[in-house]
Image (cartoon, rainbow, N blue to C red):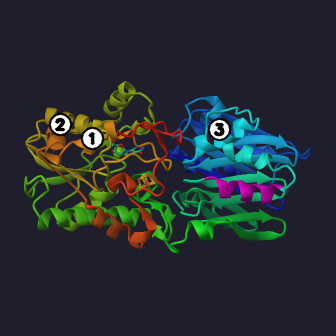
Amino acid sequence: MCGVFGAYSARDFVAEDVYLGLSALQHRGQESAGVAWIDENRRVNVVKGMGLVHEALSQSVLANTPVTRAIGHVRYSTSGGSMMQNAQPICANYAQGPVAIAHNGNLTNFLHLRETLESRGAIFQSTSDTEVILHLLAHQSRRRPLDALLRALSEVRGAFSLVVLLEDGLVAARDPWGFRPLALGRRGDNYYVSSESCAFNLLGASFVRDIEAGEVLLINERGLTSYSLPDSSKMAENSKRRWFCSFEYVYFARPDSVIEGISVYRARQEMGRLLAKSVSTESSPSGIGVPSVDFVASLPDSGTTAALGYSQESGIPFEAAVVRNRYVGRTFIQPTQKVRELGVRIKLSPSPELFAGRKAVLVDDSIVRGTTAGLVVSMIRECNASEVHLRISSPPVRYPCFYGIDTPSNGDLAAAKNTLEDIARTVGADSLSYLSREDMMKAIGLPPDSLCTACFDGQYLDAPDVDGERCRCSCEKIFE
Ligand code: 5GP
Ligand code: SF4
Ligand code: MG
């Protein structure tokens, strides 16, 4: 997963705005950060580094960089390795001028395109899928850059939300299915494009609208010009079908963002409410029954909004009984299993005073590998809790994502091969139940044919291009 941000102004310097925008998108990627702009000599410039925004970039240097349009990126690798060459924005000065690209999403036909381009002489500098867009563009040296970009984007498949800087202006583009979010904001005459609307709040900008699925929006001194991807009507032939990622609402996006008109906070709260309702009306799928407990707790921060909804619906009080060390980043961001496991212990700590001798429902947004839930439940047991019932505010994650979220290969997904009873036993919970797919869709509130739920139900758009068992989209996942 990644975050992208772009800024355009007729006269204000905007590089610092991009820095601040990226800080608000930090939850979308903590591996590297970068900012790019085009200078007065028509050359593209980029500063990037590894780590968090404030580690990778200098705010004071950017504040003094006299540019009126710039783009930026925060990266969490879902394609290509974790290294400096793969940090974005990706930049080039080609026959038609300078270009910089920042990308969120995974291109599913990446390897196929890369092989074709290499057979035509392209030399790739990185292992990131985004670089194929640059090569596809540069291979059309007689077209003006915007036309070349439109053509290039009609050849790629899968998920992309992009901000692109051309001499002609700032471009925002979203794939015809809309997997990853992308929003337009405005402050006075300045325009901003951001993965999530939460970044506008920080800049005092207001949300204008989402970039539409299949839209390419050019922002320059002539104003805003909207184009449709050349064959998006054909690709989106069953007209209104969209593939907005449901996992953005479950986990990924910040709760103060609004995506496709839906508040992420409200969606999560409703997921918690429906979770409480389903548990009180049916026995849990594992047949363990309805928990009557002293309090509801969450795995912070990702499970908290749903836990509040659960508490509001059930009338059981919420206690902030698991404390999060806010100076340790998202568990998932750590690349190895060993670091990931240690990370949970460093990050989350249950209060013995609250758990000792008491019964609790513990709400989290999702179980992926099962590492987090297993470790926290065992820490809660060490606090002498009498019962711990785990409630998950999304359906079981059974299939890998190859549209840009780093769910692992299905062999590593707790729910891919195990029954709920097995998972409950492995994580050590007295009972376990998940939100149903239908309730998740209901909580989000978008028409059912506008959401992607592939990691829950295996219903992919375009079957993965699998070579043997390995996905050819470069997400490096194994399909068993
Ligand atoms: P697990 O420990 O089961 O592998 O991961 C589950 C935890 O990681 C949950 O608390 C959830 O908030 C978080 N999580 C779920 N999916 C993702 C993801 O795709 N990326 C990141 N960074 N975290 C995730
Ligand atoms: Fe989102 Fe899951 Fe679809 Fe990936 S597979 S885009 S995580 S809903
Ligand atoms: Mg979490």
Looking at the image, tell me whether mark 2 or mark 1 is earlier in sequence order. Answer: 1
Observer able to see residue 206: no
Looking at the rendered structure, the kind of residue marked 2 is Thr
Q: Secondary structure at mark 3?
A: helix
Q: Secondary structure at mark 2?
A: helix
Residue 184 on image: x %, y %:
64, 65
Looking at the rendered structure, the kind of residue marked 1 is Ala
In 3D space, how far apart are the residues under numbered discs 2 and 1 (Cα atoms)? 9 Å
In 3D space, how far apart are the residues under numbered discs 3 and 1 (Cα atoms)? 34 Å
Q: Which residues are magenta?
A: 145-156
The residue that disc 1 covers is 414
Q: Nearer the viewer, residue 185 or 327?
A: 185
In the rendered view, does 51 fall on the left or right side of 140? left
The residue that disc 2 covers is 426
Q: Residues within 10 Å of mark 1 (few under 14, many from 20)?
A: many
Q: Nearer the viewer, residue 1 or 412?
A: 412
**Dots 2 and 1: beta carbons under 8 Å?**
yes
In the rendered view, does 321 fall on the left or right side of 211? left
Residue 432 on image: x %, y %:
17, 49
Looking at the rendered structure, the kind of residue marked 3 is Glu
The residue that disc 3 covers is 115
229 inside magenta stretch: no
In 3D space, how far apart are the residues under numbered discs 2 and 3 (Cα atoms)? 43 Å
56 is higher (above) or lower (below) than 270: above
Looking at the image, tell me whether mark 2 or mark 3 is earlier in sequence order. Answer: 3
Residue placed at 88% from the left, 45% from the top? 95
Residue placed at 25% from the left, 61% from the top? 436
Residue placed at 12% from the left, 68% from the top? 281
